[in-house]
Amino acid sequence: MIRLPLLDHWPAERFPDPAEALHEPSGLLAFGGDLSPERLRAAYAQGIFPWFNEGEPILWWSPDPRCVFRTAQLCQPNRSLRRLLARCGWQVTVDRDFVGVMHACAAPRDGQPGTWISPEMIDAYATLHARGHAHSVEVWRDATMVGGIYGVMSGRLFSGESMFSRESGGSKVALLALARLLRDWGCPLLDAQVTNPHLLSLGAEEMPRADYLAALRTLAYQPLESSDWTRVTPMDAATLA
């Protein structure tokens, strides 16, 4: 019988070694604890993230391999995305409506019975955002949000949590805008956590967990000025082409 560590009485900054995570399901490392800002920040800095359904205990993961984007490569839109950028007339903002992005990501999707982005998760990440450690990119058509992405910043590495589209291409534009910002700020990786065919089609790649953690140990402790996010002004999507 496999026994997972229970974190209820562990200090917020302490987690098991990710190398001890299960092979099946891939990356399951521990359960329990809480979603306090201190525990969440410590988890992401160690290559660990929470992922669980409403009504379940909090589950903590560090999968092998890790799904990542290299920001420099992601910044090169293909022909169809360039055409969309040129004609869409959309505007891109940063941190204008973090909670709105989370709610949009939590909305039911075709073929999915529910969402893991529970009210508990929204409250926890909204607190993290208020403290300057979680951020969002929004894409707008006039006053309507048509796409977005949100995640957590650890030094010079961004961990993407979820993205959404209300119009075709909305999430791709948000992802491209985020990658441009990260590249310009000296952040080489955008963590996408768990591999799926859609992410791979967008240019993500699989990285062995050991390599990801080695990169994280350097990047997570290279400070990114919080003012970098507050200085981002709204931009026309066409400028990303």
Image: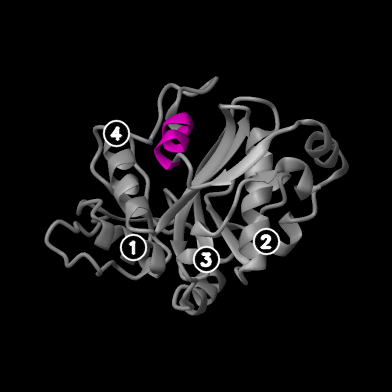
Q: Please give the residue where the numbered disc 3 appears in the rendered image.
A: 157
Q: Position of residue 135 (x, y in %)?
A: 46, 52
Residue assigned mark 1: 41
Q: Position of residue 203 (x, y in %)?
A: 72, 51
The answer to whether marks 4 and 2 mark residues whose Cβ atoms lie closer than 8 Å is no
Q: Which residues are magenta?
A: 98-105
Give the mark nearer the N terminus: 4 vs 1.
1
- For label 4, the SS is helix
At which x and y percent is residue 162?
A: 50, 42
Amino acid, disc 3? Leu
Circle 2 residue:
71
Residue 153, image x and y in percent? 46, 61
Please give left or right for residue 80 compared with residue 110 in the image: right
Ranked by sequence position, the earlier of labels 2 and 3 is 2
Specify whether residue 214 is painted magenta: no
Q: Is residue 35 above or below residue 214?
A: above
User: Upstream in the sequence, badge 4 or badge 2?
Assistant: 2
